[in-house]
Image (cartoon, grey):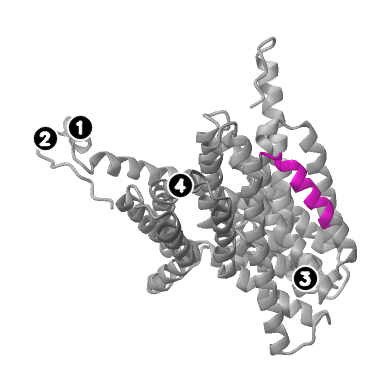
Amino acid sequence: MGFLENIGAVILGTLRDLAPLIGLILFFQIIVIRKRLANLKRVAIGFVYVVIGLSLFLIGLQSALFPLGETMARQLTDPEFLGLVAGAAAAWDDYLWVYLFAAAIGFGTTIAEPALIAVADKAGSVSGGAINPWGLRLAVALGVSVGVTLGALRIVTGVPLHWILMAGYAIVIVQTFFAARTIIPLAYDSGGVTTSTVTVPLVAALGLGLAANVPGRSPLIDGFGLIALASVFPIIAVLGYAQLTARLTRKREPGASTERT
Amino acid sequence: MATPGGKPKSKAPRFADAVRGHALGAPALSFFLMVLGTLRDLVPIIAVIAVFQLAILRQPFPDLGEIIIGLAFVMFGLALFVKGLEMGLFPLGESLAQDFTRKGSLFWLLLFSFALGFGTTVAEPALIAVAAAAARAAAEGGMIASGAEAERSFALGLRYTVALSAGAGIALGVFRILKGWPVHWLIMSGYVAVVILSFFAPEEIIGIAYDMGGVTTSTITVPLVTALGVGISSMIRGRNPLLDGFGLIAFACLAPILSVLIFGMLL
C-alpha cells in the first residue's frame, strides 16, 4: 500500500490548486458584494467533497492506471517491440499499434474526465434535456481519439503541426455555418474541457515516447502538439454529432417541425 | 459521508423505507448508486489498458490488488467530486453571477472574470510543468540562450503570458454574454489570427503555443466558469443560457495561443 502514503501530499496539492479560487471568491464576496452567501454550510461541505473527491480520484489513478499506461506508451513505441532496425528510417505503417493505442487511450481517458462529466451534465440540464450528456461525452471522446491518433501520425511522418491544425480550424469554420446556433458555444467549449487531469499525463507520455523513438524527431520539439490536436477535433465531433442528431430526428418525424435546439 | 443510515429495527422488506426515512438515508443510498454509476465512466479506460496489457504486450498485471484498490478510490473520488460540484461550485458560481448582475457594475464583473482566469491559471501545475518543458525545448532549439537563468525567465514569462491572456479571454467572454454577440464570429476571427500569426512566429514556439490553450483550464476552474456563464446569461433578459452561457472556456483556450505566438515573436 505504498500509494496510501501520498494521500496527504495529493490532498495538499488539490488544496493548493483550490486556494487562489477560494481567496478570490472570499475577496469578492466580502469586499465587493458584501452579502452573506446563502447556504454557506452546504457550499462549504461541497468544497470539502470536491477536494477529497478529486484527491481520491487522482490517488487512485496514480496508483492504478497511470504507471501502467505510461509503461505501455513506452513499450509500444519501442523499436524492438515494433520489429524495427534501430536507426533505420521507419515507414508510417510500422506504427499501427501506436495509432490504435492512441485512439483507444484518447477515447478512454476522455470518458473518465471529471470536468467533461460536469459540463455535459450542466449542458443537459440547461438545455432541458435536448442535449444528451452521454451522447455529448461520446462525441467529445471520439474527437479526442481522432485528434490524438492524427497527432501520433504527425510525429511519425513529420508533417508540420500547423498544417493539421489549420485544416482542423477550416473544418470547424465550415461546420459552424451549417450547425444549429445553440450547439456552437458548447461545441467550442468542449475543446478546452477535454484536456485535463486524466488525459494530459497519458497523452503526453505517448507523445514523448514516440518522439524519442522515431528517428529524426526531437522529444522536446515534436513531443508538443498532441494536446492541441486533442482540443480541436472534439469541436468538429460535437458539431458533427449535433448535425447528425438533427438529421436523424428530422427523418424519424417527417412533417414534424424540426426543432433545431 | 457514507454512513448508511436507518436503524435496522424493521424487517427486511422495510429496509429501503427505513433508509429513506432517516435523515441521511436517501442521500446515502443515492450516493452509493452514484459510486456504482461511475463504473460506466471508467469501463473504457480499464478495457483499453487491460486489452493492451494482456493481448498485445502479453504481460501479466504487476500488482492486481493495488490496481483494484486504486480503482475503488477512483470510483469513490469521482462520485464525491461530482456531488461536491452540485453542492458547492455550481451554486456558488451562479449566485456570484446573480449578485454581480444585480449590482450592475460592469467593472467589478469583468475584474472578477479576469481574476478568475488569471488566478487559477498562473498556479496551475500542468502549466508550470509544460512551461518548464517548453523552456528546455526553446533553449535546445537555439531560440533563447541556454542556461538555467535564461530558461527560468522564459518559463516565467510564458506562464504570465498564458495566465494574463486566459484572464483576458474569460473577461472578453463575459463581455460577449452581456453584449449578446454571437460566439462564433469572435472565435473564428481568433482562428484566422492564429493562422496568420503561425506564419510569422518562430517554428519552435508554434507547438508550445498550440498546447498552451489546452492546459489553462483545470478540473476545478471549468465547472465554476461554466456556472458563471450560465448564471449571467440566465439573469439577463433575452439571453439563452445554452446559446450565451457557454463559450467562456473556448475564449480561455484561444487567447493564450494568440498571446504565446506573439510572445515568441517578441523574443
**Residue A139 makes an appearance in the image:** yes
User: Judging from the image, what secondary structure is the residue with disc 3 in?
Assistant: helix
Which badge, 3 or 4, is on the more N-terminal residue?
4
**Residue A211 appears left or right of B226:** right
Q: Given contact means CB atoms under 8 Å apart, are the residues at marks 1 and 2 in contact?
A: yes
Of the pair B236 and B216, the residue shown nearer to us: B236
* Image quadrant in which you'd find residue B24: top left
| Residue identifier under label 3 | B263
What quarter of the picture does the C terminus of chain B occupy? Answer: bottom right
**Residue B213 appears left or right of B245:** right
Measured in 3D between alpha carbons, the distance from the residue under mark 1 to the one under mark 2, in whole angstroms, is: 9 Å
Check the image and report above or below for B162 versus B175: below
Which badge, 2 or 3, is on the more N-terminal residue?
2
Residue ID at (33%, 44%) = B32
Q: Residues within 10 Å of mark 1 (few under 14, many from 20)?
A: some
Q: Residues within 10 Å of mark 4 (few under 14, many from 20)?
A: many
| Residue identifier under label 2 | B10
Which chain is home to disc 1?
B
Q: Which residues are magenta?
A: B180-194
Which chain is home to disc 4?
B
Q: Residues within 10 Å of mark 2 (few under 14, many from 20)?
A: few
| Residue identifier under label 4 | B99
